[in-house]
Image: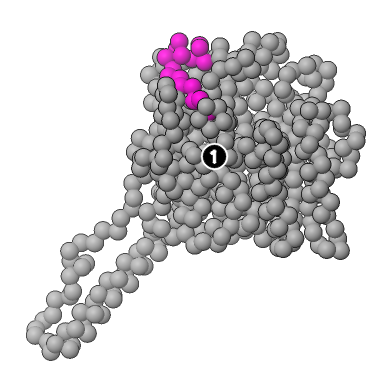
Amino acid sequence: MKPYVTCQQLKILHSPKELRPAELPGPAPPQDFRCILVMAVLGTMLAAALLIHTFLLPFHQSVWAGNLTVASFVDNACSDPCRIVLVESIPEGLTYEDNSTASPSTFEAWGKLLADARSTVDIAAFYWSLRNEDTHTQDPSASQGEEILAGLLKLSERGIATRIAVNPPSSRLPSSDLQALEESGAQIRQVDLPRLTTGVLHTKFWIVDQTHIYLGSANMDWRALTQVKELGVAVYNCSCLARDLGKMFEAYWALGLPNASIPSPWPANYSTTYNKETPLGLKLNGTAAGVYLSSSPPALCATGRTKDLQAVLSVIDGAQKFVCVAVMSYLPTMEFSHPRRFWPVIDDHLRKVAYEQRVHVRLLMGCWKHSKAIMFPFLRSLAAMQDNRTHCNIEVRLFVVPANETQAKIPYARVNHNKYMVSDQVAYIGTSNWSGDYFLHTAGSALVVNQSQVEAGVQPTVRDQLQAVFERDWNSRYSRELSFLGQWEDLCGTH
């Protein structure tokens, strides 16, 4: 959350003896002396290079897909024993075939973060709605959200400092959970992004003890645990990454002060050296990786921070074989702009890699009664590029979460709310829907992981796991060809 302490930079230290040329037994002619001196210096440099290669490079080496920049910067290496876990929320009643890919639940991840907390918990969230009373429902599945809220309410009595950055309350965004948290001792700041950027605070992440994090699609909402399909990532024992995410939280926290304004440029303590050009080199589950955090909107990006849109485009452009996208909403427009504005930036890049590089592009879209009707003509346009003769390969499907009579009455539920992308090179896990407003005006964040240099078959990487989730959903009975849309118009495209 806050940029408490930046990651310590690794330095190669040399003793005076190492830097001193070898002593000679007696006088030597000037030419011989110069030769010996040059050889000694070269030998020292070679030894230092070997030390760097042997001890530091395994933690840091990566070829970053997108612009194929070789990243081998000693200052960006991290020796933390980072553990990463892909987590999901699977709505009640949605079942897969036996032996299908399964992930730990979002509820389990949040519960572990609460149990492991010792000193600080910082949360950035769109809104809070963890109890039945917040949604005017009486659904038993709200118990998981209520359990999480109960754990958060006990943090202060455990001596744990809690900070929450959130949007200002409104008629659609209840505040009773926040009032209870504030009364329990949590500090809360409302970030007025509608005034500052004409967007909202849409990001969703936790930072615990400047060491553990959660980032993903799940809102602080009981429905995000049991009634909405979500995907995120929990990373444990990774202070380098947690402190970098903390700088983003700290920016929100500063903007939550009364009458705050966005600084330009941001002070140096908000800056980062971890980005798509120079990712953080570390080991995830014992496997070498290059990672960075991206952010939106651009006005909230301090020096060095990769803008979220640039991260998305980099992953698309760097694909060599395929790109798989799973998001709730995809619109090549400024979705909330009046008058209407076309915004084809991501759309253009998807078409370009499909046409120029023959990359197989697949999009798995959410489908529910709140889907924007205009989304479907744009999706049909993408799917129309599918052509065996020209070898353009773009496929689009809709993921429909089933609902029984009771579940259908739960407001704003039963949808695939995922916001991720996976290519043959990189895993991207974000918090934003894919339309122009989310990247230009609204606060979002993403974790980008490259483990492309790991030998295939050694052990599943994060990218491997994310691809397995996508394949499971793409091939499931809940996935429908876009051409079947006529059968689903009662479920999606009504707005």
Give the crowd class for mark 1: few <14, some 14-19, many >=20 residues within 10 Å: many
Q: Is 439 in front, or is 230?
A: 439
Q: Report the residue marked by disc 1.
A: 296
Furthest residue to the left?
A: 27
Residue located at (42% from left, 27% from top): 260
Q: Is 82 in front, or is 62?
A: 62
Vertical comparison of 465 with 48: above or below = above
Q: Is residue 281 magenta?
A: no
Vertical comparison of 317 with 298: above or below = below
The x, y position of residue 457, in whole percent, is: 63, 56
Mark 1, secondary structure of its residue: strand
Furthest residue to the front?
A: 339
Say what amino acid the circle numbered 1 marks: Ser
Residue located at (61% from left, 37% from top): 438
Any part of residue 99 in sight: no
Residue located at (50% from left, 30% from top): 196
Vertical comparison of 163 with 84: above or below = above
Of the 4 image quadrants, the one containing the N terminus is: top left
Q: Quadrant of residue 171?
A: top right
Q: Quadrant of residue 335?
A: top right
Describe residue 227's horizontal placement relative to residue 33 as left or right.
right
The x, y position of residue 351, in whole percent, is: 73, 55
Describe residue 92's horizontal placement relative to residue 280 as left or right.
right
Write the start and end of the magenta stretch as one range. 178-193
Vertical comparison of 271 with 166: above or below = below
Describe residue 147's horizontal placement relative to residue 59 as left or right.
right
Residue located at (28% from left, 76% from top): 42
